[in-house]
Every structure is written in structure tokens, then in C-alpha cells.
Amino acid sequence: MTDADLDPVIHAQSRLRVVATLAALAPGDRLTFPRLQQLLEMTAGNLSTHLRKLEEAEYVTVQKTFEGRTPATYVELSGQGRAAFERYTRALAELLGGAL
């Protein structure tokens, strides 16, 4: 097992935190952008940057909508993102297995 086996999109610390938080939700569940920002204690700009990278990899879906006249943004881990996170955690467990 090498570092190359760890998905570089997920491996960045902030993106790993985003994906792990969303993976804790049931498939199909989502969080509002402000709630995710609060949970991760990230600035809006920093979170947006990492979400964009995850969205480009098709690991998350970001849905912008309105609730009445108020804009709302929802973030959800895609099926592809959930599978990538499972592969990532297995690869990390294998990597750490030799160190335990």
C-alpha cells in the first residue's frame, strides 16, 4: 500500500472532514451549507472551495434553491462519493494495519 492508493481528492484534511461529515448521514440525507459550515468550523469561502473540488469529482451534489424568498443551499454526498469514501477508509485501514 502506498500513498498513491489514497484518493487525493478526499485526502486533503478539509475535504476529508467534509466527506466524513456527510458520510455520517444516511444515503439521500443532506445538510444546509450554513449547518455544514458550523459543524466544520470553516469559513464560507474555504468550505466553498473544498465543495467545488468535491463537486468536480462528483463526490458531492450541491443544490441551490429557495425556501420562500430565502436562498438555501443543500449539500449531499453522492453515491459515487460514498463509494470513494469507503474505498478511502479501507485503503487507510490497510495502510495503518501494519503500524498497529
Image: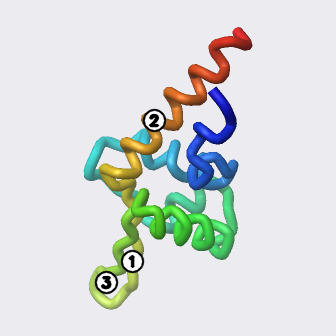
Kind of element beneath mark 3: strand
Q: Which mark is residue 72?
A: 1
Kind of element beneath mark 2: helix
Residue 95 as seen in the image, left or right of residue 32: right
Instruction: Give amino acid for label 1.
Output: Ala
How far apart, in angstroms, are the residues tagged by discs 1 and 2? 31 Å
In percent of width and height, residue 1 lies at 63, 26
How far apart, in angstroms, are the residues tagged by discs 3 and 2? 35 Å
Q: Is the C-beta separation of discs 1 and 3 under 8 Å?
A: yes
Q: Is residue 17 visible?
A: no
Instruction: Residue under label 2, please give it.
Output: 87
Q: Quadrant of residue 70?
A: bottom left
Q: How many marks?
A: 3
Instruction: Give amino acid for label 2.
Output: Arg
Q: Which residue lies most toward the bottom here?
A: 69
Of pointers 1 and 3, the one earlier in the residue sequence: 3
Residue 98 as seen in the image, left or right of residue 81: right
Q: Which mark is residue 80?
A: none
Q: How busy is the neighbourhood of tag 3: few (under 14 within 10 Å), some, or many (20 plus)? A: few
Instruction: Give amino acid for label 3.
Output: Phe
Instruction: Residue under label 3, please give it.
Output: 66
